[in-house]
Amino acid sequence: MKIKVLTIKEDILGANEKKARSNQDRLDEHGILAVNIMSSPGAGKTSLIWQTLDRLKSESRIAVIEGDVASQVDADKLHQHGVPIIQINIPGGCHLDANMVENALDNLPLKELDLIIIENVGNLVCPAEFDLGEHKRVVLSSMPEGDDKPYKYPLMFTEADVVLVNKLDLLPHLDFNASYFCEGITRLNPTVKILQVSCKTGEGLEQWFSWLLAQMKDGKARQAA
Amino acid sequence: MKIKVLTIKEDILGANEKKARSNQDRLDEHGILAVNIMSSPGAGKTSLIWQTLDRLKSESRIAVIEGDVASQVDADKLHQHGVPIIQINIPGGCHLDANMVENALDNLPLKELDLIIIENVGNLVCPAEFDLGEHKRVVLSSMPEGDDKPYKYPLMFTEADVVLVNKLDLLPHLDFNASYFCEGITRLNPTVKILQVSCKTGEGLEQWFSWLLAQMKDGKARQAA
């Protein structure tokens, strides 16, 4: 039984990879940057997106793809920003895949966008295995979750382009060893960018906005090339 | 492709269910209570087990089964209590299944135990789908994760026997609406027991210990019957 499952899984991942490449080609045609935001449940993905829309929507044309097992709680919150939002619900599922993102792209005004932010399902395991066609992978870790997460969920951190360590405002009340946490990540992924932030107070987010704007410029360069 | 996956998934769940029943029969023969503890990463499962061993190991014979994607960080912490611990690592996996628990039972001194605590992989989605043969399902939710979790991850809360809401010590620093949270759970699962606790300070844990001791008595009654 176990071998059977693995075979099917390889088929799924192979088909997903092909679809992901086609999604990325489509994004590049339009010079759109796509970022895939992944984290445990409740680490602050929606708050990060809220802050990002608040700061960047006047200068960049942004859309959001919301992945959830159930509900549209997050989409309802972000709706107030007036940007295009596609809600994907996956009952019984645990991650987004490239096919779901293709369907979302079909429903977005691609000619009028610079950035698509994809909020994946809150899960520190499964989403890391599925390429969506995104250009950059952002992992959000929350300080109250503890400093041992990179040791216990290595794949997610190995494949990240940026790790945001959120809820810095709670740090005085926690036993969180930032050196131990960062060491766990850089051991797996020596070039990753790690930023400590608070999506509640805004502390540290300017570096995130700068990084995102720089990546968007690269997207336009890819389109021109 | 999607239908194929679902078919295989049904086969897996069917086989798992059969194995889970056999695990539970084996536990009942020995009058052992098994609890399956599930949560997001970093919600405090290991701290809960630490506190439980600390309080109950003098009066009850306890073993722990530790499920992790990688590392034995948690098992190393709990090792200091001197109880039997079985570490299960599941690279590329996202939940425990009944087969893994059967293997663990093969390696535990069942004649000398009253309680087996199973710490599942940190994941608020996938573990809920797999019966391990446990008698009770415990979901640990952490206040910093936010009060919307029952709305966004309903299955986990629907199937819980007890929900422990952890990190009560951080409540003064959070925007956590306990009524909204509890309403989300009782809508799905009207008879569930919800306890607010801090595994750091110990606040609220006496109710958890009492509940656990009562369940152990039921286990002995099942054996006698």
Image (spheres, coloured by chain):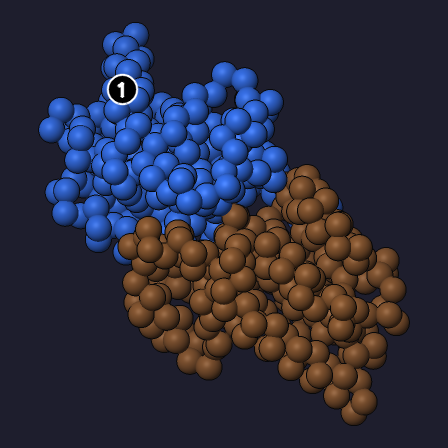
Chain colours: A blue, B brown
**In the rendered view, would you say A8 is above or below A194?**
below
The relative height of residue B157 versus residue B104 in the rendered view (above or below) is below
Residue that lies at the very extreme toward the bottom in this rendered image: B225
Residue at image location 66% in from the left, 77% down from the top: B213
The chain letter under disc 1 is A
Q: Position of residue A163 (x, y in %)?
A: 43, 29
* Picture residue at 48% right of the left edge, 76% below the top: B193
> Which three-letter amino acid code belongs to the residue tagged 1?
Ser
Residue B194 drawn at (x, y percent): 46, 72
Front in this rendered view, residue A150 or A32: A150
Is residue A111 visible to us here? no
Local crowd size for mark 1, using a 10 Å CA cut-off: few (<14), some (14–19), many (≥20)? few
Is residue B179 placed above or below A76 in the rendered structure? Answer: below
Decide if residue B158 is on the left or right side of residue A72.
right
Circle 1 — which element? helix
What residue is disc 1 on? A210
